[in-house]
Image: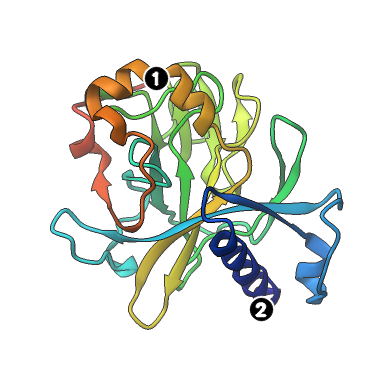
Amino acid sequence: MEQARRKFIGICVASVTAHASGPVACAYAQDAAKSGAKGASANSSSSLTVRKYARAKLVDADGKAIKAKSLKANYNYVFHYPYASTPCFLLNLDGPVADTVSLKTEAGNVYDWPGGVGSNRTIVAYSAICAHKLAYPTRQVSFIGFRASPSKASSRGKVITCCSDKSVYDPFAGAKVVSGPAPQPLAAILLEHDAATDEIFAVGTFGGEKFNEFFLKYDFKLSMEMGDRAKDAVAGTTKLLDLVNYSTQTAQC
């Protein structure tokens, strides 16, 4: 399955090269991933939808490559991808992560989240834009983030919670919706881990993106903060920061 997945990702990369004007959506049937079959139908009800973007290495504030072994467990890290203004969470979870999870976007498209990366496959990443009302971590406050302990919003703990609308997502299972009004999982970020260097790269997304809606809703705010750079594509490197240092306040719920 892993060999077939890598082959598929290679096809997506080739597609992006040939269509450099924007992201390319690719579909890959689950059955093909299991069997290694070529040319699987994109109409399969269990298709895996991937959008490829520029490859970006995760680095620290000084530009040094992040090593997977240095990541704290159950800790909120944030980086920007695939655009300069779209934040994402990186998590190194402390327990087993599902190998594959069948999920569905708000539009009804079915996809299979393939699990985490790293030596224990516990490193995952998700868009930090809530799928309900598009709350996201700002420099002033973060209403959304990973909560290790149980809370009023979720008695189970170890979930991503949005205090803006009480949506709760399970990061161990592709950020599927556990409770609340969110209509779909958080978009997952496709990661690659280089075992030789222990470095981590963001290379694309899985599932339902909310970037267009995000840009429309926050157009004025983003323009005031970033000028015309908000929609700049991230490429080469992207800085990984502690959420507690990124946002002045973190909402609790």
Instruction: Determine whether 226 is above or below 79 in the image.
Output: above
Q: Residue at x 64, y 31 (%)?
A: 184
Residue at screen point 62% across, 33% down:
177
Quadrant where the image shows the C terminus: top left
Residue 204 visible somewhere in the drawing: yes
At mark 1, the secondary structure is loop
What kind of residue is marked 1? Tyr
Where residue 44 appears, x then y in whole percent?
86, 53
The label number, if any, that marks residue 218 in the structure image: 1
Residue 148, can we see it? no
Q: Find the distance from the CA under tag 1 to the CA under tag 2.
A: 40 Å
Mark 1 or mark 2, which has the lower sequence index? 2
Mark drawn on residue 3 = 2
Q: Nearer the viewer, residue 12 or 93?
A: 12
Crowding near pointer 1: few (<14 within 10 Å), some, many (20+)? few
Residue 55: x percent and y percent? Answer: 42, 61
Number of other residues with Cα within 10 Å of mark 2, as a class: few under 14, some 14 to 19, many 20 or more: few
x%, y% of residue 78? Answer: 32, 44
Q: Nearer the viewer, residue 27 or 61?
A: 27
Relative depth, front residue between 103 and 43: 43
Residue occupying the point 18% across, 61% down = 63
- Quarter of the image that includes the N terminus: bottom right
Q: Which tag is nearer the camera, tag 1 or tag 2?
A: 1
Residue type at mark 2: give it: Gln
Q: Is residue 83 left or right of residue 33?
A: left
Dot 2: element: helix
Image location (x, y in percent) of residue 180:
59, 21
